[in-house]
Image (cartoon, grey):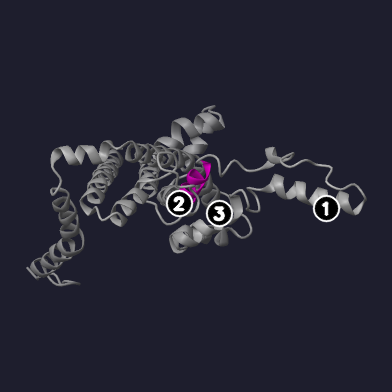
Amino acid sequence: MARANRVIPGLPLTLGYTLFYLSLFVLLPLAGLVIKTTQLSPREFYATLADPVVVAAFQLTFGASALAAAINGVFGLTVAWVLVREPFFGRRIFDALIDFPFALPTAVAGITFSNLYLADGWIGGFGEHASAFLNRLAGQLGHPNPLPEGALSWLDFPYSNTNVGIVIVLVFVGLPFVVRSLQPVLQDWDPEYEQAAYSLGAGGATTFRRVIFPALFPAWLSGVALSFARAIGEYGSVIFIASNIPGKSQIVPLQIVIKLDEFEPAQATAIGVVLLFFSLLILLAINGIEYWSRHRSQAV
């Protein structure tokens, strides 16, 4: 029997390279993180994580990330559907823009959003800007300052006084994961299933709920999970948006940086280990979803 030609070298070489690569760039750094944390006693480890400021940071990070992932789950599905199923002028340009958060440095994204939505930004301070413009216009007409300070503050975007800005930035960085997870499934989807449902008397909502979405659900759930995992580790763009008030608007990655600045690397790694644990859980969940999806498609 003729031996098949190999495109790449055999198993011993490729397996050795794979294990070396994973060990050097993945396993060793993660092991170093865990080992550094063991410098803390169990009581110190608990005290680090039980700090009210750290607890509030975890609550904000996971809460904002979950909300952003949920928003991306809805609008990411809509965007993917439109890009695949609805031809329109400039669709390729919009499709390319979906990957923009991947290419844009996070610091640039943070500066951009802060210039737009903070109290002194173009949109965030819309009420203040409108009031100043109307007062200048009235002054030119001989009626100086008819509007008291803050008269149009209700038009301001609720950005500086809440954590809405953090959620918006996390939506921005997480949207591509949902869209790119759904697009291949939608492209392979056969519209004949929809036509069959319509011919049997099903309406649009019923067809989507009973026929289309079950086929999209594994990819959709995987994209939402990736969006959530990306959001809990976001740092560069959020620090430009959040007011960074301890216990109110500080995220977990910022707490890690603060601990390092205070020369407490063991406490920083303790917080990092918790993030690592949840990230691994998300990755295991994603792999479980993909495994279930493959077996489900084979069974069908």
Say which element carries label 1: helix
Please give left or right for residue 59 compared with residue 82 in the image: left
Say which element carries label 2: helix
**Mark 1 / mark 3, whichever is N-terminal:** 3
Q: Please, what is the three-letter code of the amino acid marked with disc 2?
A: Val
Residue pointed to by mark 2: 238
- Compared to residue 79, the image places residue 70 above or below, namely above
Please give left or right for residue 237 compared with residue 45 in the image: right
Residue at 15%, 54% (x, y): give it: 31
Across the whole image, how many numbered discs are drawn on residues? 3
**Mark 1 / mark 2, whichever is N-terminal:** 1
Residue pointed to by mark 3: 114
- Asked whether residue 82 is drawn in magenta, I would say no
Say which element carries label 3: helix
Q: Which residue is nearer to you in this view: 173 or 296?
A: 173
Residue 226: x %, y % from top left: 36, 47
Q: Which mark is residue 136?
A: 1
Residue 243: x %, y % from top left: 49, 47
**Mark 3 / mark 2, whichever is N-terminal:** 3
Rendered-image quadrant of the C terminus? top left
Q: Please, what is the three-letter code of the amino acid marked with disc 3?
A: Ser
Residue at 23%, 48% (x, y): give it: 267
- Seen as rendered, the residue at the extreme top is 201
Please give left or right for residue 208 compared with residue 298 in the image: right
- Asked whether residue 173 is drawn in magenta, I would say yes
* Distance between the alpha carbons at the discs numbered 1 and 3: 26 Å
Which portion, as a residue range, is magenta? 164-174
